[in-house]
Amino acid sequence: MHELSVTESMLGVVLRHAQANNATKVTRINMVMGEMSTVMEDSVRFYFEIIGKDTIAQDAELNFRHTKLITKCKECGKEFEVVEYDFTCPECKGTSTEIISGREFQVESIEIS
Amino acid sequence: MEIEVLEGVFDANEIIAKENRALLDREGAFMINLMASPGAGKTSVIMKTLEGVSGDLNCAVIEGDIAGKVDSERIAAAGVPAIQINTGGSCHLEAKQINHALNHLNLEGVDLVIVENVGNLVCPAEFKLGEDLKVMILSVAEGHDKPLKYPLMFSECHVLIVNKIDLIPHTDFDVEELETTVLKMNPGVVIFRVSCRTSEGLDYWTTWLKKRIRG
């Protein structure tokens, strides 16, 4: 539902980095999207086509790398994949964990010419 | 040529959220970001909270809605300063809008700012506002199966208020199952069972909140 504003922010990040590197064209945008992100890839693509028009990022290929939800137990240090949002540590049954990946929605890199 | 960026799309919002945090710290005010579906009872919980802390805490309210000012009028009629933000179709509040509202509220002497987010269990969870506490409400009529459908919201909130518990006898709502599921997703969450209609359980919530703010 919030993909328009999210796509605007994404385009802003892309254009800022492209301009800082004197790009004339952005050919590819590599994104990282965590399992827990609420952003819909298809909607981002849809909005990007509209708002990317007439910018140097127009027609850039959007690539999404999806990351699984991985957490680290603060008690025993075990890293584990969270299945069905159960954050209980499978090793020590600890409940204090820290998310390592799966929350991100990030512009990882861009390819420019 | 490939350029490494490594910048989060929500980073810009988070920078403003931090500014809000600093502003609130300077003013000595605590802020709650209250989130729930439409009709879960956000405004009712706010009204009851204002009642429960009155005399102890000075409050202000920021109301976020897609359109209209019904909610802020309700709050203002109770004698509490309220600002209405109309998001004009947008499904959530962002830190920038809160920054604007905080700069328009007179925060002098205000201990607690309650932000009523737009009715939605998805998007508001992604946008930090600079709050001290993320509080979500789930009402009995919505069903106990919601946590796994809206995992981000349930795992991000610090407090879960289960509202409309007076309806439980008329439904299949399993409050124990709800709490077990939510605690697996979010072991640190504090859960209150309340009814704004009968006022049951609200004392626990407001007493806990006052303690949390005053230390």
Image (cartoon, coloured by chain):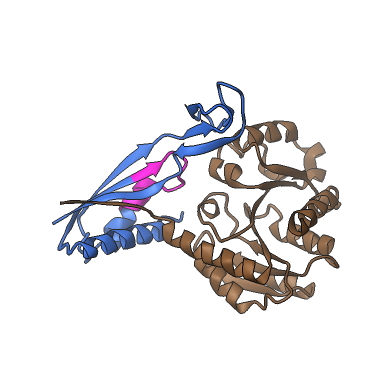
Image point (69%, 73%), residue name: B82
- State the image coordinates of residue A79 (x, y, percent, origin top left): 48, 28
Image point (74%, 32%), residue name: B176
Is residue A35 within the magenta segment?
yes
Is residue B36 within the magenta segment?
no
State the image quarter where residue B132 is shown.
bottom right
- State the image coordinates of residue A58 (x, y, percent, origin top left): 21, 59
Which quadrant does the C terminus of chain B fall into? bottom right
Image point (21%, 53%), residue name: A60
Q: Colour of chain A?
A: blue
Label the brown chain with its letter.
Answer: B
Question: Relative to residue A63, is residue B57 depicted above or below?
Answer: below
Horizontal side of residue B123 vs B44, given as left or right: left
State the image quarter where residue B65 is shown.
bottom right
Question: Relative to residue A77, is residue B101 depicted above or below?
Answer: below
In the image, B23 versus B139, the foreground residue is B23
- Which residues fall within the magenta stretch? A32-45
Image point (45%, 56%), residue name: A2
- State the image coordinates of residue B199 (x, y, percent, origin top left): 85, 53
- State the image coordinates of residue A81 (x, y, percent, origin top left): 47, 28
